[in-house]
């Protein structure tokens, strides 16, 4: 067994000539976030599946393997008001995470930020709120809107199909009702219609085959061929 080590560019690609990536049987990437976590990913593996992820925590005694933080958080919070399951596919293998939203009523004399978004584009949240007001007759005046999307592999999630999940989380928070225990994803068009940008099979399989969550239901666009969904 021969192990070759190389540097990465700022973009996360292999530095120098790309011949090395074609010569080896297994290509491993060792990334880190701003904390003590490290992520081991296999973009290439001739002996098994690719895009598997191992997560480690740097301790005083060295690296210690830990579970998938985002999926563990989803397991603990699923079924709560303002918490909606989503499966992102833009980083390595599909990862399940919890989209969280709250809509607390602003009372006179309280110091409350009326709009707070973490891990997601605030302008996209404003656009989703516009859709909810126009197409769902939702009243948001006097509410402190908060949306939180956890990072995956130390990076913010940039996935267009998160829009419908954010909308579902906000609806749940605004009406103080737990959402269905179902995977939610889709892109909301300017007309208010929902559509899927890519084949949903990967996301659906990740939710259905999860060892503990095993989400059998999904709220997605009914325009997806071969899949029964819900259009908004």
Image: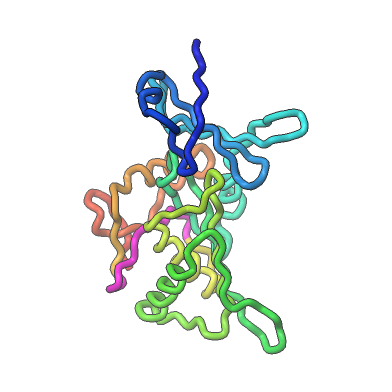
Image coordinates of residue 130 in percent, x first then y, are 40, 77
Instruction: Confirm whether the magenta stretch covers residue 190.
Output: yes
Residue 151 position (above or below residue 42):
below
81 relative to 92 in the view: left or right: right
Q: Spot the residue most to the top.
A: 1
Q: Quarter-wise, where is residue 127 in the image?
A: bottom left
Q: Quadrant of the C terminus?
A: bottom left
Image coordinates of residue 32 in percent, x first then y, are 59, 40
**What type of secondary structure mainly makes up the magenta span?**
loop
Give me the residue at 23% from left, 49% from top: 226
Q: Quarter-wise, where is residue 94 in the image?
A: top left
Residue 52 position (above or below residue 124):
above
As rendered, which of 148 and 75 lies closer to the eye? 148
Name the image colouring: rainbow
Image coordinates of residue 90 in percent, x first then y, are 41, 46
Q: Spot the residue most to the right.
A: 60
Across the whole image, how many numbered discs are drawn on residues?
A: 0
Give me the residue at 40% from left, 63% from top: 163
Give me the residue at 59% from left, 78% from top: 114
As rendered, which of 166 and 79 lies closer to the eye? 166
Q: Quarter-wise, where is residue 30 in the image?
A: top right
Give me the residue at 49% from left, 12% from top: 2
Instruction: Confirm whether the magenta stretch covers residue 31.
Output: no
Residue 212 position (above or below residue 19):
below
Which residues fall within the magenta stretch? 180-192
38 relative to 133 in the view: left or right: right
Image coordinates of residue 198 in percent, x first then y, are 29, 50
Q: Spot the residue most to the left.
A: 225
Q: Spot the residue most to the front.
A: 16
């Amino acid at each position: 067994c021969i192990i070759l080590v190389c540097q990465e560019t700022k973009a996360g690609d292999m530095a120098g000539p790309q011949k090395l990536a074609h010569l080896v049987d297994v290509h491993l990437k060792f990334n880190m976030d701003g904390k003590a976590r490290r992520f081991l990913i296999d973009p290439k593996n001739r002996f098994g599946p690719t895009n598997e992820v191992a997560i480690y925590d740097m301790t005083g005694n060295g690296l210690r393997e830990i579970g998938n933080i985002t999926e563990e958080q989803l397991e603990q919070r699923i079924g709560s008001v303002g918490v909606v399951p989503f499966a992102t596919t833009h980083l390595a293998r599909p990862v399940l995470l919890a989209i969280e939203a709250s809509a607390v009523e602003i009372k006179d004399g309280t110091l409350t930020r009326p709009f707070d978004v973490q891990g997601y584009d605030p302008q996209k949240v404003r656009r989703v709120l516009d859709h909810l007001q126009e197409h769902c007759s939702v009243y948001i005046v006097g509410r402190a809107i908060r949306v939180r999307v956890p990072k995956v592999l130390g990076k913010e999630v940039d996935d267009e199909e998160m829009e419908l999940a954010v909308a579902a989380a906000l609806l749940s928070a605004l009406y103080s009702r737990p959402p269905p225990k179902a995977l939610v994803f889709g892109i909301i068009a300017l007309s208010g219609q929902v559509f899927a940008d890519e084949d949903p099979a990967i996301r659906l399989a990740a939710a259905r085959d999860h060892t503990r969550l095993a989400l059998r239901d999904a709220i997605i666009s009914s325009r997806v061929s071969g899949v029964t969904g819900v259009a908004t």
